Image (cartoon, rainbow, N blue to C red):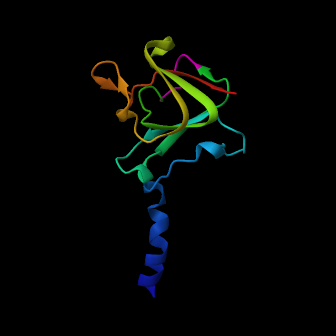
Amino acid sequence: MKLLCALLLLPFFFEGLLAQCPSPSNLLNDAGEKLCARMFEHSNIYFEQSCGGSFLDAKNGDDFPYMPLGWGNKISSLVVANRCTLKVWSKSAKGGNNRTFNAGVVYQLKDYSNGLFGDWNDSIQSYYCTCT
């Protein structure tokens, strides 16, 4: 009986390990407000396990030339809501390389080149998010 209870509770202990990216068409915060984008701390080679760890929400019109404390060079995956764009820079104060992400899911930022030899994984230092 104890073994059966343990097996039934096991999936709840690993729920956070199997993260799943939210849908761009229904990107909402905990209060039910529409978001422009959600940026995640972790990604994974298996897409169904990307969008894990802590996340940073961006609302329409958010303009951050400097990332919030603790978020510089930490973003590895992101979701941009429908009819929205997220523009990111590789240096603070909107300096360095930049890239615009349109609506959709970016499972791994390492798949997007940043300059000649780099990629966007853990490289975002500032952002601007807009929706139409």
Residue shown at 40%/43% (left/top)? 43
Residue 96, percent from left and from top: 41, 12
Q: Is residue 68 magenta?
A: yes
Q: Is residue 41 above or below residue 6?
A: above
Q: How many numbered marks have been drawn onto this rendered protein structure?
A: 0
- Of 53 and 78, nearer the camera is 78
Residue shown at 42%/32% (left/top)? 74
Magenta region, main secondary structure: loop
Q: Is residue 30 above or below residue 92?
A: below
Left or right? Give the position of 27 relative to 120: right
Left or right? Give the position of 78 relative to 34: left
* Quadrant of the rendering where the N terminus is positioned: bottom left
Q: Is residue 69 above or below residue 54?
A: above
Please identify the residue farthest to the right as the structure is shown: 32
Please identify the residue farthest to the bottom as the structure is shown: 1
* Residue 79 location, quadrant: top right
* Quadrant of the rendering where the C terminus is positioned: top right
Residue 28, percent from left and from top: 66, 43
Q: Which residues are magenta?
A: 64-70
Q: Is residue 119 above or below residue 66?
A: below
Q: Is residue 131 magenta?
A: no
Residue 21, percent from left and from top: 51, 48
Left or right? Give the position of 102 relative to 130: left
Residue shown at 44%/33% (left/top)? 75
- Of 100 and 37, nearer the camera is 100
Residue shown at 40%/39% (left/top)? 108
Residue 34, percent from left and from top: 70, 39
- Of 59 and 97, nearer the camera is 97
